[in-house]
Image: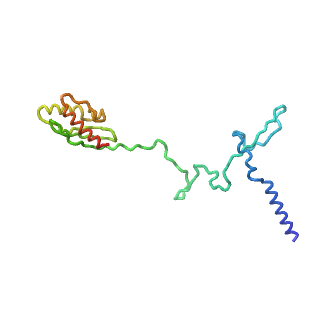
Amino acid sequence: MRRALLAITGLAAGTTALVVLKGAPQDRQVAVDLPAGVPVGTPDRTEPATPGATPQRTTATLRPTGRPDDPTAGRTPAARRTTPGGDTGTRRTPAAGRTTAPKPTTRTVTGPVVSTEFGNVQVRITVAGTRIVDAVALELPQGGQSDLRSDRVDAAYSGTSGDVVRQQGANLDTVSQATATSDGYRRSLQAALDQAR
């Protein structure tokens, strides 16, 4: 009975000593607001290092390490992970600059047939992405002076280096002495552009 009483008293005294020595949780946050750059773990010193020197007081800075019960404390973003096959490896991210832009799709759009006083006009364009790369007159007025006017309009507007590709639209100058044919070409072209958008 006496031994049991001594053991209980010793245990209580030991527990009390641990609680007193460990201190309250708020007592451990002494240096949270201290300035950065102070060496960690430097003890308080008040005596001068050399004779005649002014005493300096340095304070240890505590670095937060996370809660002890936090399972992610101490982990870094590149922590090793286990893959479904059981292998471990680091998480990889794609390198910058390796993305490839999709190639523009090329499509052909045909405008409607436009009637003019000399005959019908119809235009077809080829578009790569949003850029016109070619224009072709599928139908132009024929016969007599119309052949000459149609040839001039076709030479000025059509092809991969014609005015349609250079201007990238239907805002074209009228071909001299071929006003009606030029107007019909521009109207069919504008309708094709509207479909392409």
Task: Tell me: residue 35, above or below residue 28.
Answer: above
Residue 196: x, y in percent? 30, 43
State the residue lying farthest toward the front.
117
Task: Tell me: residue 53, above or below residue 32.
Answer: above
Left/right of residue 45 with respect to residue 107 in the rendered view: right
Image quarter of the C terminus: top left
Residue 47: x, y in percent? 83, 38
Residue 68: x, y in percent? 68, 54
Residue 118: x, y in percent? 14, 35
Left/right of residue 156 with respect to residue 88 in the rendered view: left
State the residue lying farthest toward the left.
144
Q: Front-most of 75 and 156?
A: 156
Q: Front-most of 74 and 20?
A: 20
Task: Tell me: residue 155, above or below residue 42.
Answer: above
State the residue lying farthest toward the right.
2
Task: Tell me: residue 85, above or below residue 104.
Answer: below
* Residue 12 picture quarter: bottom right
* Residue 3 picture quarter: bottom right
Residue sitting at x 66%, y 51% = 66
Left/right of residue 97 with respect to residue 142 in the rendered view: right
Image quarter of the N terminus: bottom right
Residue sitting at x 88%, y 69% = 2
